[in-house]
Amino acid sequence: MTRVRSQPNSQTITGLFKGHRTRVSCDECDICYNVCPGSPELDRELLKEQVIGDMRPRILAARINNQKLHKLTHDGGAATAITQQMLSNGQKVAVTVKDKTYPLKTLHTTLRALDEATSAAGTRYGTTPNVLSLHERPDCFIGLGCHTTAIRRAEAEGLIKPPVLIGLFCMRNINYQNLLKILAQVGVNREDATKIRIEENQVKIRTRDDKDNVTIPLEEVSSLFRDECRFCPDPTAELADISIGSIGTEDKWSTIVIRTKRGADLINKLEENGTITTTDEVDSGAIERLIKLKSQ
């Protein structure tokens, strides 16, 4: 059974680091500040050296071989393949899923059963407190660069031993209330909208019957996306064990960046058991241009 947690509060957040708080009140505790990915004291290169080491990243293109799952994904389904592998081993995976009533609303949860793998397939936009899923002691965590940075900072502080971290490429994000504003602007009911994609400077909204798909120029709604994302220096989740995106690969393939030994071990296992097909045909320059563009 998939369990979805509620919105965060100070008790659930500090509960992640039970036994490490040195102050009685929340105002006197510095843990949240120290692990926040936006804290100005963050030295990304030093943190990378501490938690990643000097392993040279390996970039591949990957595609899940399960055709049923591949059809549910927009790209190559690499994250779904990892989810499937973990669940088939009896391990737990922290992911983002969609609300059953309002599909564009995102929720964080921890999957435990193999038949739940499809619930996490596909691309979603939404601001969810995924780090709280660490309460469930997952074996694998799939999130964005801001999530993986927070977890790595907690690791560097000696607060947690992180699960396998899968980071998803991300240029921008938007909260659900602002998504509703976009739907209102284009005249789509929230019950009818099933998916949102951003491609070629267009926001594309798919409806339940696929007969009334809507497109709106990104520039018309760009102010609704999170301001914090404009200043994010990490579009490719550089502190994850494995980073996954679609930049630099052909349609229906995923770009994967292997950054650690345990990330390499996981991908090797997926290749050996036939879960994924991989190739070296990746335009790494496209990834470098993405990072440069985001840092401007």
Image: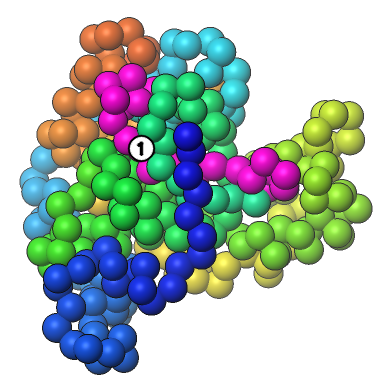
Q: Is 72 left, or right, of 82 in this rendering?
A: right
Q: Residues within 10 Å of mark 1 (few under 14, many from 20)?
A: many
Location of residue 147 in the rendering, given as x and y in whole percent from the top left corner: 36, 57
Q: Nearer the viewer, residue 167 or 278?
A: 167
Location of residue 291 in the rendering, given as x and y in whole percent from the top left corner: 39, 52
Residue located beneath label 1 in the image: 93
Q: Secondary structure under badge 1?
A: strand
Residue 287 among magenta residues: no
- Image quadrant assignment for residue 93: top left
Please say whether residue 58 is visible from this viewpoint: yes
Q: Is 181 left, or right, of 31 in this rendering?
A: right
Image vertical order of residue 270 relative to residue 233, above or below = above
Q: Looking at the figure, which quarter contains the C terminus?
A: bottom left
Q: Is 31 left, or right, of 112 in this rendering?
A: left
- Image quadrant assignment for residue 91: top left
Q: Nearer the viewer, residue 23 or 194?
A: 23
Extent of the magenta region: 84-104
Residue 88 among magenta residues: yes
Location of residue 278 in the rendering, given as x and y in whole percent from the top left corner: 34, 16
- As shown in the figure, which amino acid type bears the numbered disc 1? Val
Image vertical order of residue 100 relative to residue 224, above or below = above
Identity of the residue drawn at 64% across and 45% down:
99
Identity of the residue drawn at 16% across and 34% down:
262
